[in-house]
Image: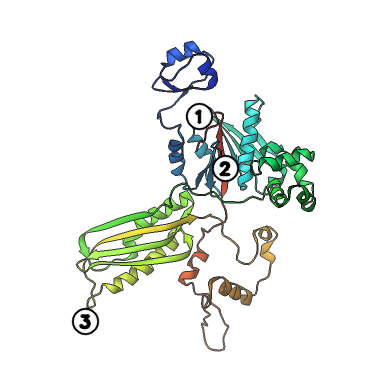
Amino acid sequence: MVSHQDIVFDCDEVAFKNGVRPGDTLRQAKLACPSCHVVRVTDRNAIHLKGILDILAKTTPYIEPDEDENGVFVGLTRGDPVKHIMNLMDRRYFLAIAGNSRSKFLAKASSGWFLKKYLKNQKIFPGKKEWGSVDVGSGYVLISIDHGKEKNFSAHLPLTEMWTAPPEVVSTLYSLGFKSLEDIQGIAVEELSRHVGEWAGLLKEWAFGKDFSHVRPLYPPPFVIKEINFQDPVSAIGIEALEPVLREISEDFLRKGIGFKAMTLSLSGDFGIVSGEKRLVRPICSIDSVKMITKALLDEIQSKVKKSPGDNQGLFCSISSVSLKIFDTAQVSATPLPLFWSLQEKHEKTNKIPASLELVLLGLEEKYGDNAVNLGCTGARGGIFKPEILRREKMLSLWDPVRIAGAAPCIFSSEKSEAIS
């Protein structure tokens, strides 16, 4: 039963059959059902779905309630403190069970499997496993599946955890004598397709843990608006004046694992309001990239507010305030992506893969369009040719250390079969 300020406002079926009713005092409830576990919460609305979603939204905008309302997917970037997020659920539920994996399918399947073990009073042993680890903390169980070990873990899963397949497909698999996902791993996709048709390819992907779909954001993408007012109007603004605000935005975005692809900057003064906008190909969030974009936009706008060409002093007008709006956010990862080979090849001694300068330049041109790369020559004519890649706006995010590389979703489930997040 759940209590707030020593008043019961929710209880399970066992407590209800023993006479516990919402509105009872905690003393009355304990007399009616001495064996019931009491969960005390400081916020009465905290255990409801919206309250829990709001808690998780403080860590990442990528939270997706499960369709069967038994849990919530949370999109995390690599290195996020998963245990910290689990601790946010403390005192919201008696127990939260979470699966942490790059595979969205395995994230839910693992938590559902361990939840059934817990409800059957089976012992859950923490520690290192051949496929990852199990961590048991205060009020939570965390199942972490290492990248590359998805096949090892899914081999142990029973067919009942094939939540992505329709019931008729699962029934067909049972009729074929299949009992676990290991049976699906061991059959050729052609043979499987004779019985389940087009589902065969998807079943094989799920069985090997190759479902790397992203978690969808629950709320609209966030935007940031910052205002900087000057007590004494200035004639010009340098990037140094905006750096504290930009650094604050960068650190907040890095913490949440998101970046932005659009920025609007407005200057106000005795000339009125002059605005400019920059749009990027890929999301950025590192402070160096944010400063570079902002400086380019700031210089462009300030050139518009100069006095008339007849004024030989060339001074700027009086600027009283700056308004900065950052929007069009997207998920990013702190792991850079390779340009000319796949992620799988990246783990196979990619430092030994030769790449000629011509291949690099042609690849950049193909990816970012014509004239994305310029070559320059320094030194005396006839000397050593030193090619230089000039980073233009379209290529800026290419060099940003934070770019999209996939998220690691996890699902939270509770013994009350209610969604938590």
- Horizontal side of residue 215 vs 50, given as left or right: right
Question: From this viewpoint, which residue is outermost toward the bottom?
Answer: 381
Q: Is residue 414 above or below residue 351?
A: above
Q: Where is residue 67 in the image (x, y as percent from the top left)?
A: 55, 41
- Horizontal side of residue 253 vs 124, given as left or right: left
Q: How far apart are marks 2 and 3 (CA)?
A: 63 Å
Residues at marks 2 and 3 touching, judged by CB atoms closer than 8 Å: no
- Horizontal side of residue 154 vs 141, given as left or right: right
* Residue occupied by mark 3: 312
Q: What residue type is labelled 1?
A: Tyr
Q: Residue 306 is drawn in which quadrant? A: bottom left
Number of other residues with Cα within 10 Å of mark 1, as a class: few under 14, some 14 to 19, many 20 or more: many
How many labels sit on residues?
Answer: 3
Residue at 33%, 63% (x, y): give it.
265
* Residue occupied by mark 2: 410
The first of marks 2 and 1 along the sequence is 1
Q: Which of 401 and 330 is in front in this view?
A: 330
Q: Residue 250 is drawn in which quadrant? A: bottom left
* Residue occupied by mark 1: 93
* Secondary-structure class at tag 1: loop
Q: What residue type is labelled 2?
A: Cys
For the question of whether residue 153 can be seen, the reply is no
Q: Where is residue 47 in the image (x, y as percent from the top left)?
A: 46, 31
Q: In this view, does 367 lie above or below 257?
A: below
Residue at 39%, 55% (x, y): give it.
247
